[in-house]
Image (cartoon, rainbow, N blue to C red):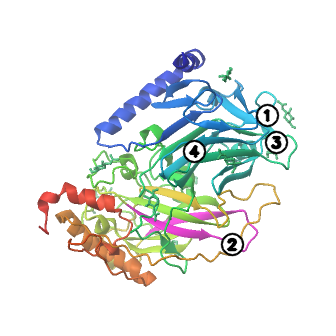
Amino acid sequence: MVNLSFSKLLNIINPPMITLSISVFLTFQHLFTIGVTSYDPEENFAINCGFSGSGNFNFRDWTGDNDTILFSLFEPHNHPSIPVDSPLHSTSVYQVPYSTARVSRYKFSYVFPVTHGHKFIRLHFFPASYPNFNRSNSLFSVRTGSYTLLKEFNASHTADKDNNPQGTVSREYCMNVEPVQMLNLTFTPSSTHPDAYAFINGLEIVSMPNDLYYTETDGQGLIPVGLNSQMYPIENNTALETVYRINVGGSQILPEQDTGMFRNWDGDVPYVEEQHNQSTPSGFGSKLKDNGQNDTAPDTVYLTARNYGKNATSKYNVTWQFEVDLGFFYMVRLHFCEFEQEIQKPGERVFQIFKADNLAESHADVIMCTGGNLIPVYKDYVVSMFSKASLKKLTLSVKLQPHPNEKLRAYNDVILTGIEIFKVNDSDGNLHGPNPNSSRSTPQLSEPLRKSNKMNIVPIVVGVGSGVILLSLIGFLIFGRLTIARNSRWGKSKSRKTDESSLPLDLCRHFSIREIKAAAKNFDELSLLG
Ligand SMILES: *[C@@H]1O[C@H](CO)[C@@H](O)[C@H](O)[C@H]1NC(C)=O
Ligand SMILES: *[C@@H]1O[C@H](CO)[C@@H](O)[C@H](O)[C@H]1NC(C)=O
Ligand SMILES: *[C@@H]1O[C@H](CO)[C@@H](O)[C@H](O)[C@H]1NC(C)=O
Ligand SMILES: *[C@@H]1O[C@H](CO)[C@@H](O)[C@H](O)[C@H]1NC(C)=O
Ligand SMILES: *[C@@H]1O[C@H](CO)[C@@H](O)[C@H](O)[C@H]1NC(C)=O
Ligand SMILES: *[C@@H]1O[C@H](CO)[C@@H](O)[C@H](O)[C@H]1NC(C)=O
Ligand SMILES: *[C@@H]1O[C@H](CO)[C@@H](O)[C@H](O)[C@H]1NC(C)=O
Ligand SMILES: *[C@@H]1O[C@H](CO)[C@@H](O)[C@H](O)[C@H]1NC(C)=O
Ligand SMILES: *[C@@H]1O[C@H](CO)[C@@H](O)[C@H](O)[C@H]1NC(C)=O
């Protein structure tokens, strides 16, 4: 019955949608055939708010929130929220979850039974005039636990400003749920505006691997850039908001094409500095070597990049510019993969990386770090965006230039395949930025002191060695040593397990143990240590 209402919508109103789904399906199949193993999230709620029943859309089961027992809705008995249909004049309303919404002038909460661990929370909004709810009057906050995700959020303003042709707004957050905690998402209309109401079209709660973005207990954290501070761990009490997730040199990767976590990856064209837009994507159909890093990013992220072209003589920074809110720390993850056949050895493509015009890597050499071609790798940095100027937005730039010392490199070139930027919650648990046209915003003028809770030394021990690991290690030692030397932080490696010989892997940061373990497993016949 319910499935019917979905297909009815699709068939009658918008037949081309079916074709779209089929082509998406083919792409999806294709991804699997080139070897993506997908993460299978323990929790995978996709909630179509204001809808009754459930249905499959884009390979996902979307559950209506009007008559489900999977989770609960708490609201005042005398002022229940209202399930409504979206107005029919926009093209986006035919798509799940934007075709219906839940609206209310009173506070309402969704409470989800979830297991403990790290979760994505995604909120989807289609600001429109719903029956008796004028588009321009939506103004509300969204809280979960001790975090404020959105505050005095004007959805129509946000949609208009973002210039999104479909007029929809989506937000993604990452947080940790402690054992026996429920996940409570509360929508509260603003009390500053007489007709203010809250609404929501779609909600997602999706588990993620515990080491995907959070620093593991024995992990090191992010490399500080332009900060006189220690390594910066992303601990369980941190909440993150995804502000950009970019497939460099490539095009959008849809949620259903992600590695099982339904993340959206955008193309990088809007962010590349225009005068340098001749830096072209290099697309290669090659297959990545399986190093166990199978859920960090889809293979397609690692197989497109921007660079100068190896014969170029240009001297400029390949530059991406990202507008961010003032007054926060940002976690910046860069994804690399050396996929050009000509580049096989350390010292061939050596470059420098700047974040917000501060040197982040003085000697980046992907082959040196991975030990070979077609092996993906990522590195995490923390950048602070505080300013004394009375700005609300700042530009966080990522710049790459070839190493200035020509003797240290064979090619005048750089490479980058992916960028993810997350906002880190402030000391009050806020993730919301300053609001437009509001005097309520009080951006912090100077950087708060961050208490560092521990020496972040990674004692990683790998029991099984391999040719690849040893090779990589040599790279790690050098890549790691340079960064570490700059930050004057040397680590002494400790054994994680008792009897295993200890390799000083702490010198190469930001390779999760999972990757190293998996790499070791894949090559254990080459064991060197046995
Ligand atoms: C990733 O790869 C490793 C080793 O190849 C495998 O054990 C693991 O299950 C894979 N992870 C996912 C999420 O498929
Ligand atoms: C929501 O559910 C109630 C009770 O199950 C039902 O009476 C109502 O028609 C539903 N509303 C919508 C919009 O489907
Ligand atoms: C952080 O949370 C994860 C998942 O809930 C858990 O496995 C890990 O032990 C926690 N770390 C600490 C230091 O509590
Ligand atoms: C919504 O409010 C604006 C300004 O208050 C008004 O111009 C507009 O006609 C209203 N729209 C509807 C559908 O009532
Ligand atoms: C939301 O923003 C729009 C456009 O900027 C504005 O017209 C409207 O008054 C704002 N709504 C509220 C409730 O502040
Ligand atoms: C959810 O959180 C809100 C706001 O913090 C609170 O008022 C409400 O009682 C909570 N509901 C449940 C069921 O925990
Ligand atoms: C590059 O920038 C120029 C203007 O500076 C613009 O006309 C052109 O379309 C851009 N090319 C691409 C591929 O974005
Ligand atoms: C780059 O230079 C090499 C050696 O000089 C040459 O063989 C190759 O064809 C050039 N490639 C391009 C794209 O110009
Ligand atoms: C690249 O950007 C950095 C940081 O802003 C700057 O120091 C450097 O001179 C730039 N390089 C070139 C070639 O413009």
Please report the bounds of the magenta region as a residue range.
378-401
Can residue 317 be seen at all in this image of the molecule?
no
- Identity, as a three-letter code, of the amino acid under mark 3: Ala
Dot 1: within a 10 Å radius of its alpha carbon, few (fewer than 14), some, or many (20 or more) residues?
few
Q: Mark 2 or mark 4: which comes first in sequence?
A: 4
Q: Looking at the image, is mark 2 or mark 3 earlier in the sequence? A: 3
Instruction: Answer yes or no: disc 2 within 8 Å of ligand 9.
Output: no
Measured in 3D between alpha carbons, the distance from the residue under mark 1 to the one under mark 2, in whole angstroms, is 44 Å
Q: Is mark 1 within 8 Å of ligand 6?
A: no
- Residue assigned mark 1: 79
Majority secondary structure of magenta residues: strand
Mark 2 or 4, which is nearer the eye?
4
Label placed on residue 122? 4
Q: Name the quadrant containing residue 221.
A: bottom left
Badge 2 crowding class, 10 Å Cα cut-off, few under 14, some 14 to 19, many 20 or more, is some
Q: Earlier in the sequence, mark 3 or mark 1?
A: 1
The numbered mark at residue 196 is 3
Is residue 342 or residue 475 the one in the foreground? 475
Q: Is residue 518 left or right of residue 529?
A: right
- Mark with earlier residue (4, 3): 4
Q: Amino acid at mark 4?
A: Arg
Q: Quadrant of ligand 5?
A: top right
Front position among marks 3 and 1: 1
Instruction: Please tell me the numbered disc located at residue 387.
Output: 2
Residue at 79%, 34% (x, y): give it.
79
Q: Secondary structure at mark 3?
A: loop
Instruction: Give the percent coordinates (x, y) of residue 143.
Output: 67, 51
At a point 53% along the width and 79% down the height, the residue shown is 229
Q: Is mark 3 within 8 Å of ligand 5?
A: yes
